[in-house]
Every structure is written in structure tokens, then in C-alpha cells.
Image (tube, rainbow, N blue to C red):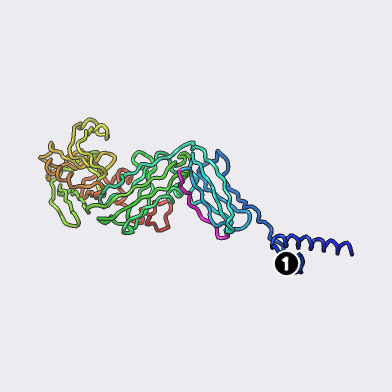
Amino acid sequence: MSRIRRTAMAGTALLAASLTACTGASDGGGDDKGKAEPPKPKAAMAVSVNLTGDQVKAGQPVTLTVAEGKLAQVKVTDAKGTELPGKISDDGKTWTSERNAPPAAEYKVEAQNTDSQTAATSFKTSAADKVNKVSINISKGSTVGVAMPVSLVFDNPVTNKAEVEKQLKVTASDNTEGSWGWLKDYDGKDRVDWRPKDYWKSGTDVKVEMHLNGVDSGKGGGLFARDYNTDFKIGKDRRVQVSLDTKKMTVTENGQAQKAVPISAGTPGGKKASWSGKMVIMTKEGTIRMDSQTVGLDNAYDKMVDYSMRLTWSGMYAHAAPWNAQNFGRANSSSGCVGMSDSDAAEFFGQSQVGDLFEVVGEGSKGRAETGNGYGEWNLSWDEWKAKSALSGAPQNG
């Protein structure tokens, strides 16, 4: 019993001496009862990151977990200073990036807990075995017509369509409602278009963001190695209608009818008939060489054609056709295109915009072109178009 008492006293004396040294008391005595022991030093902040080393496989999110306490802040920054966005879980234990780590990148990971302790680490991702790329139909800063969809064509197959689509965002200044829809381009490549529910309104500013860097496009497609973006403005509301019955082309601008132009469209009853339905002026190509052999019409023609505007990938155009002047307004006798006089074509070409609606109605067509043979999505109802989204069922306005 006495040995136990002496040990306790010795401990008390040692604590007292320690406290005396810290407080600077001069009397050397006093009652030490009730005085707390000094706080134990906090353990260093310990974190674990799912990606470590210099050859990390890209295309997966970054996850950081704290062993003790709660996270207050996490920064994952690449060599250019760009942060990988992410969120801390509700329990404060885990941070997960909202985007995948892209290929061939170096990242520094910095974490801070609620006790202001910090920890840091780093990792590098390996280069992608295969890289997928995107072609965008609308160049930055351009002005387009009210029927122009956003169209993205991929170099390689996209089987993870939903994951890719989640990273695509369209923002319109008037909150235009629209949806992405997947289809095959005319060349067989995977393609996704964003079409408004109704035609765009003139003056609308549009921004397209494609946060694809690090996204896996699926089997045979590879990883995306960069982000893409574009922005454009909606110009005049110009709509064109060609009647195969009256052999006339009528243009409306902002709802007001302009002059009717006599035309000659495709010869009915075979391969030379025109496509019908709603199309879009895809490009204004001007003077080009048209060779019938490139569109499966043998050697029917091979000539330079002025004021050419493309309507389908398969070769339907609106253009000047002075060699067919005797049939303008009288007979449809072309090889599928909509031809008109030089003067009418020059005026039409000068006033038209890429993205203007171009509709062909009446008897004698060869039907509607496939949706991917140009921009044929306007031939589908809104519900039919939305069903082509890999995320169909969720409303989308961006």
C-alpha cells in the first residue's frame, strides 16, 4: 500500500514541477489538486488517395479519404493550375472528383481538415492507348439560322453514350428547351446532335461546353484527351419552302413572305428525284465542281456550279442552274438539286444563312433522307427526338 502511495505522489510532484516551469510561479508550492494534464499533441493528418504513383490509369475519378476527423477543403490541381472539381461527402470523410483524371496529366493533391491540419501527395496518369476526338459543326463566334442543330461527330465509336452525354451542356440566353439525340452520321460514325424543341429565336446567344477530358468513350473508342467548347448566335429567322407541285421556292423572313422564285427540282420517278421533308442549309460552298459519278448517277453531269448551298451529305444542293432555264417554274428536270437562275441564286445565296430551314413539299420526291444525311431531325416529333437521348426520361435544357 505504501509503495502505491509513493508512486502517486511522485507523479504529482513531477506534474507540479512541470506546471511550475510553464507558469513561472515563484512560491514553489501550492495545491496541485484539480489541475488538468497538458493536452496531448494531435496526430498528423492521415489521408489516402485511390490514385498513386507515376503510371496511374486515366479515365477514373479521384477519391481522397481522411483517416480521422473531417475534411474542410481538398484541391486537386494539374501542372497548369487547373483544378479538378469535386465534392466532400456529407460525413466529411471522403472527397470525390466530379470528373475523371485525364491521360498524360500530373496532379498535386492537397487536403485540409477542420482542425486546420494539412496533407499533400501527387500522382501522374499514363498516356491513353487510344484517343477519341470530336468534330463540331458550328465554329466559335458564328451566326446561324433558326434550324441549326449542334452536331458532334466522333472519330471513334462511342458505346458509353450516357457517360459522354452527361458531360455535354448547352446554355442558351433565353433558356431554350432542347435535347441531345444519338444517330449515325452519313459516313457511319457515331454522332450526337442537340436540337431545340422548337426553332431557335433570333438573337439568342448559345454556349456549348463539352467536358470530355478523361471520359472513356467505351469499347474501341478510347479516352477523350481534351475538353471542347463553342459559342454562336442565332441570326435572322429565314425559312425556305420549295413546292414540287408549283415549281416555286418561297422565302419567309421574320414571318414575312419574300418573293417567290421559279425553280426546277429533281426529276420524279427515280434516283434523280429530290429529297423531301425538312432540311437545313448545311454549308454555303459557292462555286464547286459537281460530278454525278460521286453520287451514284453515272456520268450524267460534270460541271462547275455557282452559288451552291448544301442540303444533304449525299449531294442535294440549292444552286444556280442556267443550263436548265427553260424548265424554271415549269418542270422538275434536275438530277436532284433545286436549281434557279443566276440572278435569283446570287440573291438567295447572299441573303441565306447556314442553319436556315429548307423544306421540300409536294409530289414526286424520293422520300425523306435518313436523319444523319444532313440535319434531318426536324422531321421527327419532339417525343421521337427526345427518345434518341441516352438519358431519355430526364428533361434537358442543357
Instruction: Tell me the quarter of the picture where residue 344 sits.
Output: top left
- Magenta span of residues: 80-91
Q: Nearer the viewer, residue 367 or 70?
A: 70
Q: Residue beneath label 1, please? A: 35
Residue at horizontal 16%, vertical 46%?
348
Residue at horizontal 17%, vertical 41%?
339
Label 1 residue SS: loop
Viewport quadrant of the C terminus: bottom left
Specify the principal SS of the magenta part.
loop
Residue at horizontal 15%, vertical 38%?
321
Looking at the image, how many numbered discs can be counted on the residues? Answer: 1
In the image, residue 273 sits, relative to residue 239, either above or below, namely above
In the image, residue 12 sits, relative to residue 189, either above or below, namely below
Q: Nearer the viewer, residue 58 or 79?
A: 79
- Which percent across, then down, holds residue 341? 12, 41
Residue 64 in view of the camera: yes
Q: Amino acid at mark 1?
A: Lys
- Which percent across, then down, holds residue 60? 52, 46
Q: Nearer the viewer, residue 142 or 256?
A: 142
For label 1, count other residues whose C-alpha is less than 10 Å away and answer few (under 14), some (14-19) or many (20+).
few
Residue at horizontal 63%, vertical 56%?
68
Viewport quadrant of the N terminus: bottom right
Instruction: Tell me the quarter of the picture where residue 55 sits.
Output: top right
Residue 267 in view of the camera: no
Horizontally, residue 284 falls left or right of residue 224, namely left
Horizontally, residue 38 falls left or right of residue 136, namely right
In the image, residue 70 sits, relative to residue 332, either above or below, namely below
Q: Nearer the viewer, residue 393 or 381?
A: 393
- Which percent across, then down, holds residue 272? 22, 39
